Amino acid sequence: MRVIISPAKKMRVDTDSFAVRALPAFLPEARRLLVALTAMDGPSLKRLWKCNDAITALNLDRLAHMELERDLTPALLSYQGIQYQYMAPGVFSRNQLEYVQEHLRILSGFYGLLRPFDGVTPYRLEMAASLSVDGHKDLYAFWGDRLAAALATETGLVVNLASKEYSRAVSPHLPPAVRFLTCTFGELIGDKVVEKGTMCKMARGQMVRWMAEHDAAGAEELQAFADLGYRFDPQRSTPEHYVFLKEDS
């Protein structure tokens, strides 16, 4: 089983808490993307990043000094979004850290596919960014089937806790033999299941923590997840789509 999650826009440097174990598997591709980004001027990058002047300045400085093999942070600690706050990897036990290293994979527009202890440096590049590289119209075309192929060599079950922006870099390319299971965390409004952004991110991070705490090894075990008010809804779930509803909905 491999669990895929999205990265976060906000990143930090932490070279002290845990040691980096390896470089990213798709480092040559990241180098190619770095070349493409550094060839762009400031206004073009601001449009690509869709951010304000302060964030643009921060990331221009990062690009100017970017090193892909030095002063790296384990990917699991580098991202700082809500999902990662609820996962709280900084307080994982040794066994839980080994669990996520084995089972968790982080999707990235820049690095492709990351293991938790792969070393990364802060960057800004969302998977949906309109960056044309090597004749490819965007990053989905640039990555092609490489990320899915890498996952397929590791497992026959991919548990999708990523956003649609990132999961679509994998799901269309997986071979039929690999089960792709998406988990939805929503509220029942009328007869529709509606996901709310912040709560959904919280639940995804909490589920990764729960899986590590329970040493989850198979899809059916995930049905026992019951945190943040969510419970598995068997009536609205299928073998490829698990629905978790807020109890008060």
Image (cartoon, rainbow, N blue to C red):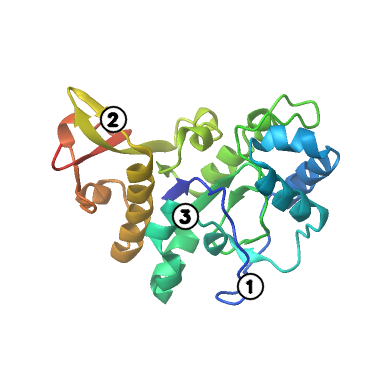
Kindly indicate the quadrant of the structure image that contains residue 186: top left
- Looking at the rendered structure, the kind of residue marked 1 is Thr
Kindly indicate the quadrant of the structure image that contains residue 92: bottom left
Mark 1 falls on what kind of element?
loop
- Looking at the rendered structure, the kind of residue marked 3 is Leu
| Of the image marks 2 and 1, the number of the one nearer the N terminus | 1
- Looking at the rendered structure, the kind of residue marked 2 is Val
* Residue at point 20%, 51% (across, down): 224
Q: Which mark is residue 15?
A: 1
C-alpha span from label 3 to label 2:
26 Å
Neighbour tally class for label 2: few under 14, some 14-19, many 20 plus, Cα within 10 Å: some
Horizontal side of residue 123 vs 156, given as left or right:
right
Residue 10 vertical placement versus 185 (above, below): below
Neighbour tally class for label 1: few under 14, some 14-19, many 20 plus, Cα within 10 Å: some
**Quick one: quadrant of the C terminus?**
top left
Q: Nearer the viewer, mark 1 or mark 3?
A: 1
* Residue underneath mark 3: 104
Q: Which mark is residue 194?
A: 2
Please state the horizontal and vertical placement of residue 202, each as a whole percent of the image: 35, 50
Q: Nearer the viewer, mark 3 or mark 2?
A: 2
* Residue at point 76%, 63% (across, down): 69
Please state the horizontal and vertical placement of residue 58, each as a whole percent of the image: 70, 52
Please state the horizontal and vertical placement of residue 49, each as a whole percent of the image: 66, 38
C-alpha span from label 1 to label 3:
21 Å
Q: Are marks 2 and 1 in contact (CB under 8 Å)?
A: no
Nearest to the observer: residue 99 or residue 176: 99
Res 217 seen here = no
Nearest to the observer: residue 39 or residue 107: 39
Neighbour tally class for label 3: few under 14, some 14-19, many 20 plus, Cα within 10 Å: many
